[in-house]
Amino acid sequence: METSKLTVDLGSRSYDIIIGYDFLETLGKQLRALGFKGKLLVITDENVFPLYGDSCMKGLKEAGYSAKIEVIPAGEGSKSWSAADKLLTSALEFVMDRDSGIVALGGGVVGDLAGFVAATYLRGVAYVQVPTTLLAQVDSSVGGKVAINHPRGKNIIGAFYQPRLVLIDLKTLETLPVRELRTGMAEVVKYGIIRDRSFFDYLHEHLNPSLEQEKDFYKHIVYRSCVIKAEVVSEDEREGGIRAILNFGHTLGHALEAATSYKHFNHGEAVNFGMLLASRLAHMQGILDKESLKIIEEMLFRMGFKELPPGLTAAEIKEGLKYDKKRRGEKLVFILPEKIGKVRIYTDIPGSLLDRLIDEFLKEFK
Ligand code: NAD
Ligand code: GLY
């Protein structure tokens, strides 16, 4: 498979996203071509390390780099002060200087944490993203949001700090558990709904519920998703405006995650429900026509919905909405579709409509 390249256009901080198949070992060469000179600290997790640690390190060593690898426990718990602290200590012990760089080899957890370490070590060293989950390939590795969690909220401590390169090896998706593939697919469908009707139609025609698809399908959807994310980030790097549309389905999705203490759903499962609820809200408010809602619902139901935990209440979901980062004072911010391929930001949704939406949802899925 030929590699494809696109650019996130951010002036002097622009960078390429390279998408290919089975080319992880070329990372060292690509970093040389970019002018990386110093030592490299590779950060990965305990699941990714046995699968891809060797080929990553081999490529770096062959290109003449002095590289060290750090393996963190898998899972959201690693986006913590203590994990960041250990990695910063490791960077110091490895005597990394300002020419040194960091490689994030893994899913969104590794990418967000490694990016945070890169943003803070010596006030910022270069880093590259090598995403190995679908979610990281289509979303978290692009756009420079890096963060760790605070016990009171996700992604509270962080920065906008762009990588120098994103290298996406589609072969890594072959070892990804299907539940993780599904979580990334929710973000892929999101891009179609928010910005690209023909991409949505492609997914509508080709996506099968098992997610067992041809390589070319994955290449196309990862490429198209990255194009859309790159365009949005280039227009509004620090989320002063349009970047917020990437949060379609995330307001109510996050509320569901928070209401279930982040234990019941993974992110994509919650976002899938969030997109359903936001689309229904748009229809109830007279923004989205019935036929478009039907097509969106058909797509989301095809991806499948996880059952709700027993006893979940409307009050718990509404409590979860309180911590939405987009909230402006008392006003909730919703990204709602006006048609497939176009969304807008709304701040004036009546509370009574939201109550009805949540009540009907709980009845239908209980
Ligand atoms: P993750 O990093 O936890 O990865 C999911 C699981 O898959 C982990 O167990 C991991 O070890 C395993 N894994 C990774 N690659 C694998 C592979 N190729 N084969 C087999 N197993 C593999 O989760 P995620 O869904 O990739 O990322 C979620 C994180 O991303 C959250 O912390 C979220 O806040 C963050 N995020 C950030 C942004 C952003 O813009 N920075 C956007 C969306 C999400
Ligand atoms: N994942 C949302 C963003 O990058 O803005």
Image: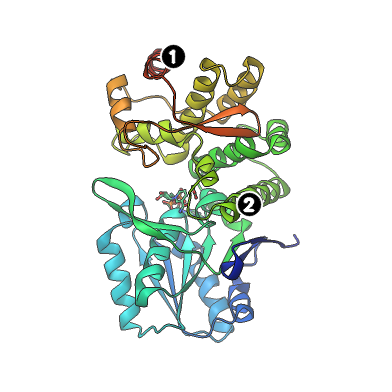
Q: Quadrant of residue 206?
A: top right
Marked residue nearer the N-terminal end (2 or 1): 2
Question: At 35% from the left edge and 70% from the top edge, which residue is drawn?
Answer: 120
Question: At 63% from the left edge and 52% from the top edge, which residue is drawn?
Answer: 231
Residue 320 visible to an observer of this rendering: yes
User: Is there a contact, CB below 8 Å, between mark 2 and mark 1?
Assistant: no
Look at the numbered disc 2 and give the secondary structure of its residue: helix
| x and y, in percent, of residue 146 in the image | 42, 58
Q: Is residue 26 above or below residue 95?
A: above
Q: Amino acid at mark 1?
A: Glu
| x and y, in percent, of residue 21 in the image | 67, 60
What residue is disc 2 on? 231
Q: Nearer the viewer, residue 340 or 48?
A: 340
| x and y, in percent, of residue 266 in the image | 41, 39
Q: Nearer the viewer, residue 200 or 119?
A: 119
The residue positioned farthest toward the right in the image shown: 2
Left or right, 285 with respect to 203, comes to left
Task: Indicate if the residue with disc 1 has its beta carbon within 8 Å of ligand 1.
Answer: no
Q: Residues within 10 Å of mark 2 (few under 14, many from 20)?
A: some
What residue is disc 1 on? 364
Quadrant of the snapshot with the N terminus: bottom right
Question: How far is disc 2 from disc 1 in space, using C-alphas?
Answer: 37 Å
Q: Nearer the viewer, residue 22 or 136?
A: 136
Q: Amino acid at mark 2?
A: Glu
Left or right, 202 with respect to 156, comes to right
Between tags 2 and 1, which lies in front? Answer: 2
Residue 178 visible to an observer of this rendering: no
